[in-house]
Amino acid sequence: MLALLGVSAACAEISADDDACGSVETDIATDRPDVTNSSQVVPRASVQVENGINWTGRQGATVIDGSNTRVRFGVSQCTEVLFDLPNYFHSPRGAASTGFSDFSPAIKRQFEQLPGDIELSATIGLELPTGNVRIAGSGYGGYIQLPWSKEIVEGWSLSGMFTAFLVPGGHASNPTLEPTFAVERQVGSRADFFVEYVADRPRRGVPSQIFDSGGAYRMTPTRQIDFRVGLGLNRAAPEHLFGVGYSFRFDNAI
């Protein structure tokens, strides 16, 4: 945990281009529905709430989880703090565990654009032991994430994210590494669609691989609905998943 705090302090010292971090004139940019998070932070003084529900099939069991709520606060230019609220898991069919996940606070910093107009940010988060041990694991956990994005031609962009997890109670598998890669297509001024590859690679054990796809529609510049459909590519991954969500932003709220 001390290492995570040290990295967080270092991120705060890295300069960012204020003009590159968005403003209240920027359309809502969410960390959902894909696994790859947005490389942009919430505008300063704004509050953004992202919600969703997932339906997942895995090894003969069906799991529904929600509300997947992430609350993001733009505390200063190019910096936000965010909170993942406990998520409830319920299994209407099969022998999957039921209960809440952990509460997780984090800080996110957007950096100035790299050569080639690549947008990059870093997130450092903790997992506090508030949830069901069978779902969230025992003890404290944490993660470091580096989401990035780049527009390649008008309407098309590439993005990805590298995450290192310290899974609570997962001493044998820590750290678990998760690379993602996505291709996104903007359709008109309000909608976009994506396809994505996600891999989870524990230090020990079998990695899982998922092919993910979906899209989002912005009803207004600060309100969005979204969906995702995913398929597991190997036996360690969920067989299939489906999710829908709704997100909104309040500007000049803090």
Image (tube, helix red, strand yellow):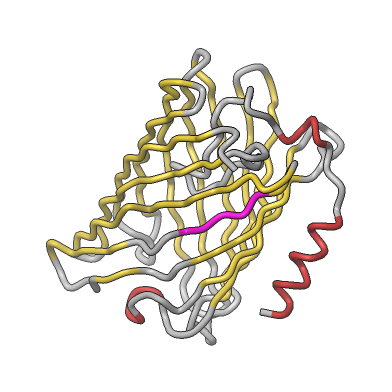
Task: Please identify the residue farthest to the top as the structure is shown.
Answer: 188
Q: Position of residue 109 (x, y in %)?
A: 72, 51
| Image quadrant assignment for residue 106 | bottom right
| Image quadrant assignment for residue 246 | top left
Does residue 67 lie above or below 151 as drawn?
below
Q: Position of residue 47 (x, y in %)?
A: 54, 42
Q: Quadrant of the N terminus?
A: bottom right
- The residue lying at 47 percent from left, 59 percent from top is 84
Q: Position of residue 215 (x, y in %)?
A: 42, 31
Magenta residues span: 80-84
| Image quadrant assignment for residue 105 | bottom right
- The residue lying at 57 percent from left, 25 percent from top is 27
**Number of callouts in the render?**
0
- Front residue of 31/35: it is 31
Does residue 67 lie above or below 31 as drawn?
below
- Front residue of 254/37: it is 254
Q: Which SS does the magenta portion mostly show?
A: strand
Locate residue 226 relative to residue 173 in the image: left or right.
Answer: left
Does residue 90 lie above or below 205 as drawn?
above
Q: Quadrant of the C terminus?
A: top right
- Front residue of 105/188: it is 105
Locate residue 174 relative to residue 110 in the image: left or right.
Answer: left
Task: Please identify the residue farthest to the left as the structure is shown.
Answer: 93
Q: Position of residue 147 (x, y in %)?
A: 65, 48
Locate residue 230 relative to residue 36 in the image: left or right.
Answer: left
- The residue lying at 82 percent from left, 63 percent from top is 10
Q: Is residue 200 magenta?
A: no
- The residue lying at 35 percent from left, 46 percent from top is 52
Does residue 8 lie above or below 44 as drawn?
below
